[in-house]
Amino acid sequence: MLRFLVYISVCLLLALPGFSCRKHEEAGTEKILQSAASRGDLRFRVYSDRSELDVMDNFQLILQAEAPESQSLVFSKLKADSANYAIVDFAAAAPLHLEGARLLYECRYTLEPMPVEELRIPALKAEFRQGEQRQELQSEEFSLKVHMSEEFKAEQEIDRRSGLPLARSLHRARGARSWLLTGFLLLALLGGLAYWFWRRRSRAAEPLQLEPAHLKALRALQQLLEQSLLEQGAFKPFYQRLSFILRVYIEERFQINAPELTSEEFLASLTREDSPLAEKRALLQEFMTHCDLVKFAEHQPGEQEARLSFDYCKSFIEQSAEVAETLS
């Protein structure tokens, strides 16, 4: 019954003169470059999936970086900013092998805009690592214009005398006002405002239907095989992607920031008593040491050795998936 009353109020509100909804044209799906930085053979770019936003629509912020295969990368984390946006989702992709022995890194944030005219995205950093050496590239802060319909703006306005939300048409000078019409418009606006708050709360309360971490990791492993890097003798990029897939899986499944830690820091974190991977520390240490030898010490494994590393990674993901489910 309550939903029916809210629906009728909104319909009446939209039918009144002076209340019109302006539908903002959907933005294209292409990436729009917002900021770029480079130094030598290092590249860092920040994109958005649209140049202008509607206050009721989510949008994507895309971070990309390029570096030689000998270097690893860590993106700085985007912090939530309640004055500009809320973070809805985050996803990091496995590095993509490029020509010239280079890797392309990418991560994506899904953001929900706040009701502001200009939404500001802060400066972000990409840290490139090679052994003990560290280099940083930083993007520039930028803004995106946010569109708000007349209906939305009307719902946000507060009459200074009554403290109640009123449409702009109620503020226009009229020679003779009908108290009946004023009360009708006020009730319709209150119903519309109640519907808007209900919709926002419903959207916030709905759990995100995220793909399980082990399924994402297994799909990434299958894509790695399909690139035929072993058949090409490209062992170094193969091991870089293999270790990255495992690190991302561990972060998403066990809330351990594996992609941002060195191998030594990550293995040290497993010695804590509360670590869900303490029992796997010895095997993980052997696996990561082997990966580091290939990535940084120019160790040349055979194809059979590389496939054994792949099988271990896949087996670890499949076996730990059920363990992670019982922990959650």
Image (tube, helix red, strand yellow):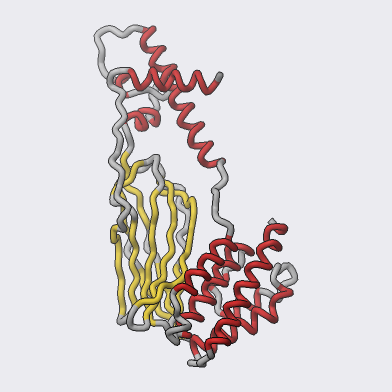
User: In the rendering, at what x and y percent does residue 192 appear?
Assistant: 43, 25
User: In the rendering, at what x and y percent does residue 241 appear?
Assistant: 49, 76
The image shows a total of numbered marks equal to 0
Q: Say if 88 sits above or below 246 in the image.
A: above
Q: Nearer the viewer, residue 321 or 79?
A: 321
The answer to which quarter of the image holds residue 34 is bottom left
User: In the rendering, at what x and y percent does residue 55 appear?
Assistant: 37, 41
The answer to which quarter of the image holds residue 20 is top left
Q: Residue at x 52, y 74 (%)?
A: 244
Q: Say if 24 sits above or below 233 in the image.
A: above
Q: Nearer the viewer, residue 87 or 240?
A: 240
Q: Residue at x 55, y 75 (%)?
A: 261
Q: Quadrant of the N terminus?
A: top right
Q: Quadrant of the C terminus?
A: bottom right
Q: Nearer the viewer, residue 49 or 42?
A: 49
Q: Residue 132, can we see it?
A: no
Q: Residue 53, can we see it?
A: yes
207 to the left or right of 85: right
247 to the left or right of 298: right
User: In the rendering, at what x and y percent does residue 310 appear?
Assistant: 57, 78
